Amino acid sequence: MNWIILILAGLMEVAFTFCLGKTRTAVGSERYWWWVGFAAALALSMYLMARASRTIPLGTVYPVWTGIGAVGAVVVGIFFFHEPVTFWRIFFITMLIISIVGLKIV
């Protein structure tokens, strides 16, 4: 169950990254609501990460959490913010995913 909580924490990190990206182009009250979404996703992400760290070693929790966030941020950047898709970006994101899986295995 705590691994599911950790994955949800990582997905909330992706959510707050998305909200942060949207604040760059939003204006008026729309910008305010993206900031509210950012703060809520950040708080939920931190809470879930802390909860997962009760039974999963912190040396595993933090890299998995940041890894999910990093991979998710790149995917969000590509699909929603039209960031470039290059061989090296895909290569290093793939290596990051392999590293995260390796941490889970060991």
Image (spheres, rainbow, N blue to C red):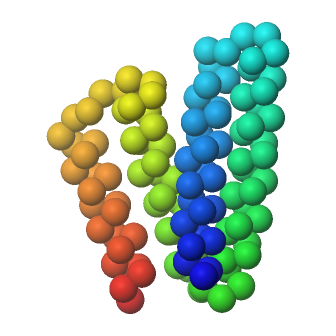
Q: Is residue 2 left or right of residue 89?
A: right
Locate the N terminus by quadrant: bottom right
Between 70 and 75, the one lying in front of the other is 75
Q: Position of residue 36 (x, y in %)?
A: 80, 35
Between 60 and 10, the one lying in front of the other is 10
Q: Position of residue 92 (x, y in %)?
A: 28, 52
Most extreme residue toward the left is: 87
The residue at the point 37 percent across, 27 percent down is 83
The residue at the point 34 percent across, 78 percent down is 102
Q: How many marks?
A: 0
Locate the C terminus by quadrant: bottom left
The residue at the point 48 percent across, 43 percent down is 73
Compared with residue 101, is residue 105 higher up or lower down, i.e. above or below? Answer: below
In the figure, residue 5 lies in which quadrant? bottom right
Q: Is residue 91 left or right of residue 67?
A: left
Q: Position of residue 32 (x, y in %)?
A: 81, 23
Between 1 and 95, the one lying in front of the other is 1
The residue at the point 71 percent across, 85 percent down is 54
Q: Is residue 13 left or right of residue 45?
A: left
